[in-house]
């Protein structure tokens, strides 16, 4: 249902970054990670300073074992949004970066 609604929104306005982000999240939820990546990246093309797709891409690449890409997205997120995060959110981002870095060293 969510997928259908986001697609309708994009049919009306293809530059609606929030619909691209939502469609990416809907695709991830049903296991279509490649489609999720596509739509989150589209959201960033439309709105480069959009926080949700950056962190979502980092998390998805971490889950997929693509640690270098995960770090890249986490670092971009940190560079753009760290200053306005709560202490707990900063800790989470730092832990995600550390986790991806450790796995990159361990798994290559």
Image (cartoon, rainbow, N blue to C red):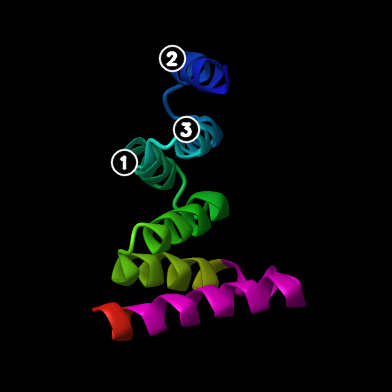
Q: How many marks?
A: 3
Residue 100: x and y in percent read 41, 75
- State the CA–CA distance, disc 2 to disc 3: 21 Å
Q: Secondary structure at mark 2?
A: helix
Overall secondary structure of the magenta stretch?
A: helix
Residue 28: x and y in percent read 46, 40
Q: Which residue is mark 3?
A: 30
| Residue at the (47%, 46%) spot, across then down | 47
The tag earlier along the polypeptide, 2 or 3, is 2
The tag earlier along the polypeptide, 2 or 1, is 2
Residue 21: x and y in percent read 51, 39
Res 39 quadrant in image? top left
Residue 56: x and y in percent read 50, 53
Res 82 quadrant in image? bottom right
Q: Which residue is mark 1?
A: 34
Residue depth check, mark 3 versus mark 1: number of the one nearer the observer? 3
Q: Secondary structure at mark 1?
A: helix
Q: Nearer the viewer, residue 91 or 8?
A: 91
Mark 1 neighbour density, 10 Å: few (under 14) some (14–19) many (20 or more): few
Q: Which residue is mark 2?
A: 11
Q: Secondary structure at mark 3?
A: loop
Q: Which residues are drawn in magenta? A: 81-103
Q: Quadrant of the C terminus?
A: bottom left
């Amino acid at each position: 249902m969510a997928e259908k609604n986001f697609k309708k929104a994009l049919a009306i306005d293809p530059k609606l970054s929030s619909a691209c982000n939502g469609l990416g999240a809907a695709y991830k939820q049903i296991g279509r990670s490649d489609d999720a990546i596509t739509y989150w990246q589209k959201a960033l093309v439309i709105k480069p300073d959009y926080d949700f797709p950056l962190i979502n891409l980092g998390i998805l690449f971490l889950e997929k074992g693509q640690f270098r890409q995960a770090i890249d997205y986490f670092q971009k997120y940190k560079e753009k949004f760290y200053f306005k995060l709560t202490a707990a959110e900063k800790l989470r981002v730092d832990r995600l970066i550390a986790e991806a870095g450790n796995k990159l060293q361990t798994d290559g």
